[in-house]
Image: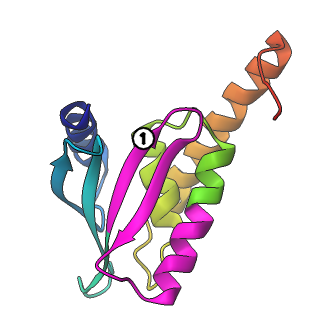
Amino acid sequence: MARALEEEFRRWVASRPSPPSLELQRADEESGGLVLSVRRRSDGVALATVSLVPVEGASFFVEGLDDPPEEVEDWLTSANSFFSEKPRLALGEALEALLSTAPGSATGSRASVKRAKEHVDEDEEDDEDDGLVLDD
């Protein structure tokens, strides 16, 4: 599963108009996720190394590696809350959402984040019309 996610990550990077402030460190076969470095766009300084793992029913789970600072932990907690509310996020949508709220100006394109969120909301509306959304 991690190799498929790695390929999807590479396609997402190639589709962007400018390089993202994320760098793939490795695909983690044990967790089935990706290990990524998040950098500030302004100066390239590393903010954090994170693990992004797909989770059934919650899209993704992200956690900081190497004892990240509190600001990064708060950012990742917020990202996980968002991911849990959007169970059908594609990897690119999750990455855009993650970058859009990163501390220290590691932001992605606001327009692409807005499009990703709108796409997810449209999918949920379609499911609600079909009676397929289940509330816990």
Q: Amino acid at mark 1?
A: Pro
The mark tally for this picture is 1
Residue shown at 84% from the left, 15% from the top: 129
Q: Is residue 89 above or below residue 100?
A: above
Residue shown at 63% from the left, 47% from the top: 84
Q: Nearer the viewer, residue 38 or 135?
A: 135
Q: Quadrant of the N terminus?
A: top left
In the figure, residue 62 lies in which quadrant? bottom left
User: Can residue 19 be spotted in the picture?
Assistant: no
What span is colored magenta in the figure? Answer: 50-79
Residue shown at 25% from the left, 48% from the top: 13
Give the left or right position of residue 70, taking residue 123 as reference: left
In the figure, residue 5 lies in which quadrant? top left
Q: Is residue 69 above or below residue 6?
A: below
Q: Is residue 42 magenta?
A: no
- Picture coordinates of residue 134, whole percent (x, y): 79, 25
Query: For the residue labelled by badge 1, is the local secondary structure a helix, a strand or a loop?
Result: strand
Q: Is residue 125 above or below residue 112?
A: above
Q: Residues within 10 Å of mark 1 (few under 14, many from 20)?
A: many
Residue shown at 64% from the left, 54% from the top: 82
- Picture coordinates of residue 36, whole percent (x, y): 26, 62
Give the left or right position of residue 34, taking residue 111 as reference: left
Please give the residue where the numbered disc 1 appears in the rendered image. Answer: 54
User: Can residue 84 be spotted in the picture?
Assistant: yes
Q: Quadrant of the C terminus?
A: top right
Q: How is the image coloured?
A: rainbow
Give the left or right position of residue 83, taking residue 38 as reference: right
Q: Nearer the viewer, residue 125 or 17?
A: 125
- Picture coordinates of residue 3, whole percent (x, y): 18, 35
Q: Nearer the viewer, residue 121 or 1?
A: 1
- Picture coordinates of residue 79, whole percent (x, y): 56, 62
Q: Is residue 62 magenta?
A: yes
